[in-house]
Structure formats: C-alpha cells, structure tokens
Image: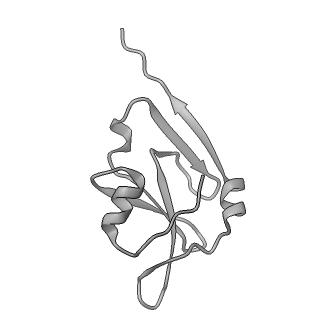
Amino acid sequence: VKIVEFDGDYKQIQKLIGCRCFDLARLPNTDSIYVDDEGLFNEPLHFFIHQDYPTPLAGMGLVLGVDIDTGDSTSPKMSFEELKSQIIFKTLVMEYQ
C-alpha cells in the first residue's frame, strides 16, 4: 500500500494498476477503488478485501474520491492509515493436473 500522485487522466489509472481496462468498486463514503477489469485472468491471483465492499477484488487497486458536483476525481475521503487498516491481502495459486 502506497500513496501515488494522480493527474486526473483516466489513462494514468491504467498505468498505475497495470491494466488495459478497469472497473470500480464504490465504497459507502463515496470513495471508489479502481481495479483491473481482467484481474481474474492473472496468475497467481492476487486479491484484496476491503471491509466495506462485499466481495474480494482481484489485482491492484487505486482508491480515489469524487467531487459530487463535478464528477472529477479527488483525493479519497479516507486517510491512508484508515485504508491500510481496512484491507487484507490474499493470493490464490491454481494447480492444474
């Protein structure tokens, strides 16, 4: 988990989380976690679980806030320390026979 600079360009989201296309998971406080839309195709499968989101998320994630009036991305409402305390990481290794 680390803090990164975001310039507002959606293409930077792709670079930051290493993906071609992304989706987002909305959190109750209006922050969102951007994730690799094809993250389930990667091996080994790396997941993280946020306490306020109902399902595990695959791959890397980027947490951003939103300006409700303009729809522009902003810094998240939650602090860095809050985020770190609200997520856990898991890895799934598939074995084929």
Q: Coloured how?
A: one colour
Q: How many marks?
A: 0
The foreground one among 53 and 88 is: 88
Report the front residue among 71 and 18.
18
Query: Dividing the image into 4 quarters, which one contains the C terminus?
Result: top left
Q: Position of residue 50 (x, y in %)?
A: 60, 53
Residue 81 in the image: state x and y as whole percent: 72, 61
Residue furthest top in the image: 97
Residue at the extreme left of the image, as rendered: 20
- Relative height, residue 54 to residue 43 (above, below): below
Q: Is residue 84 left or right of residue 20?
A: right
Residue at the image point whose x is 41% and y is 74% from the top: 7
50 left or right of 58 in image: right
The residue drawn where x is 38% and y is 62% is 13
Classify residue 77 by image quadrant.
bottom right
Q: Position of residue 40 (x, y in %)?
A: 37, 39
Q: Residue furthest bottom?
A: 69
Judge whether 41 appears above or below 72 on screen.
Answer: above
Which residue appears at 41% of the width and 57% of the height? 16
Residue drawn at x 57%, y 36% is 90
Relative to 12, is 95 above or below?
above
Q: Name which quarter of the figure residue 88 lies in.
A: top right
In percent of width and height, residue 82 lies at 71, 62
Along the line of sight, the residue nearer the viewer: 6 or 58: 6
